[in-house]
């Protein structure tokens, strides 16, 4: 593990300090916690695929439990799909989870590939939580979490076989981010991104603005990703619009005991076409 960083070293702007404080104060967020308690894998992203309608037919308290279990299954399916994009990864490889949240996907990556995985977050609370999860599994030496800024990690150049961002790029400048990723990736390495982005044609709709306000983020237009990738020499090799595949997740979450009210804006934005859920795989030559 690299040296312990102080907040003033990690948080370079007022916005970064605000975002870090916002996430640090979400310790009792029942959405992520309730779903993670299903099997001990705590996610900070959304889901993919059709849900089993039988969960809506369960009676009493079991109905809510069944919905939460199904939401967690869909979120895990999303993480699995993202990890699929890396292809062959082995124990000798190193991966970076940029914006690692409570650490679920980093733990999944190590379990699947046997690889070393480093997660970074500007939330000291998230880093502490994720470290506890790694320690519970006896994986502290292989799955490490750091209080670091993904825009300036301090890791050695070329250290990583793969990097991913899973719904975290809306908090940063894409040019700065991809410049750091090009530095960190070894030649032939892969960057995998799953993100929500707004449609350049429709512009930033009312629903997209509501999502921004709810999560204290700054959603980018779809075109900004491809411009920033090109500007930094990262070559897209696969692009998949996942919007249709994520709508069922939001439809189910709207009926769940952990609904927050943001489900409506997500569904409206996806259905009207102003917001898109995108997978981008890009390669470093």
Image (cartoon, rainbow, N blue to C red):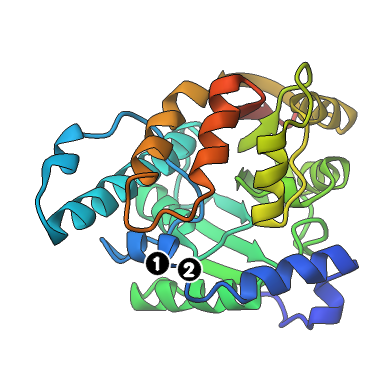
Looking at the image, residue 174 sits to the left or right of residue 163; the answer is right
Q: Which mark is residue 33?
A: 1
Work out which residue is located at the far left of the displayed protein and give it.
59
SS state under label 2: loop
Which quarter of the rendered picture does the N terminus lie within? bottom right
Work out which residue is located at the far top of the displayed protein and give it.
201
What x and y, as percent, mark residue 268?
Answer: 55, 30
Q: Comparing marks 2 and 1, which lies closer to the viewer?
A: 2
What x and y, as percent, mark residue 68?
Answer: 28, 53
Q: Quadrant of residue 255?
A: top left
- In this rendering, does residue 220 appear at all? yes
In the rendered image, the vertical position of residue 108 relative to residue 134, given as above or below = above
Residue for point 50% across, 49% down: 45
In the rendered image, the vertical position of residue 258 relative to residue 132, given as above or below = above
Looking at the image, residue 200 sits to the left or right of residue 129; the answer is right
Residue for point 79% across, 83% down: 6
How would you rate the neighbour count of disc 1 (Cα within 10 Å): few for under 14, some for 14-19, many for 20 or more? Answer: some
Q: Quadrant of residue 152?
A: bottom right
What residue is disc 2 on? 29
Residue for point 77% across, 36% down: 220
- In this rendering, does residue 169 appear at all? no
């Amino acid at each position: 593990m690299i040296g312990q960083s102080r907040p003033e070293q990690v948080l370079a702007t007022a916005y970064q300090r605000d975002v870090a404080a916002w996430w640090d104060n979400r310790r009792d967020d029942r959405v992520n916690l309730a779903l993670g308690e299903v099997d001990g894998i705590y996610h900070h992203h959304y889901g993919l695929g059709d849900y089993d309608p039988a969960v809506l037919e369960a009676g009493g308290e079991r109905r809510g439990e069944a919905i939460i279990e199904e939401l967690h299954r869909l979120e895990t399916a999303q993480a699995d799909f993202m990890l699929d994009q890396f292809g062959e990864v082995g124990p000798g490889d190193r991966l970076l989870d940029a914006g690692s949240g409570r650490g679920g996907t980093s733990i999944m990556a190590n379990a699947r590939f046997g690889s070393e995985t480093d997660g970074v977050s500007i939330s000291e609370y998230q880093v502490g939580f994720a470290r506890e999860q790694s320690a519970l599994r006896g994986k502290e030496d292989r799955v490490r979490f750091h209080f670091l800024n993904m825009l300036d990690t301090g890791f050695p150049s070329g250290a990583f076989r793969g990097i991913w961002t899973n719904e975290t790029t809306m908090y940063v400048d894409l040019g700065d981010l991809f410049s750091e990723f090009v530095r960190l990736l070894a030649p032939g390495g892969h960057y995998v991104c799953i993100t929500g982005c707004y449609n350049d044609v429709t512009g930033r709709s009312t629903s997209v603005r509501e999502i921004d306000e709810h999560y204290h983020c700054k959603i980018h237009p779809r075109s900004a990703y491809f411009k920033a990738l090109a500007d930094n020499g990262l070559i897209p090799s696969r692009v998949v619009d996942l919007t249709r595949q994520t709508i069922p997740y939001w439809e189910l979450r709207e009926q769940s005991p952990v609904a927050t009210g943001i489900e409506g804006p997500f569904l409206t934005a996806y259905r009207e076409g102003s917001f898109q859920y995108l997978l981008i795989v890009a390669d470093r030559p």
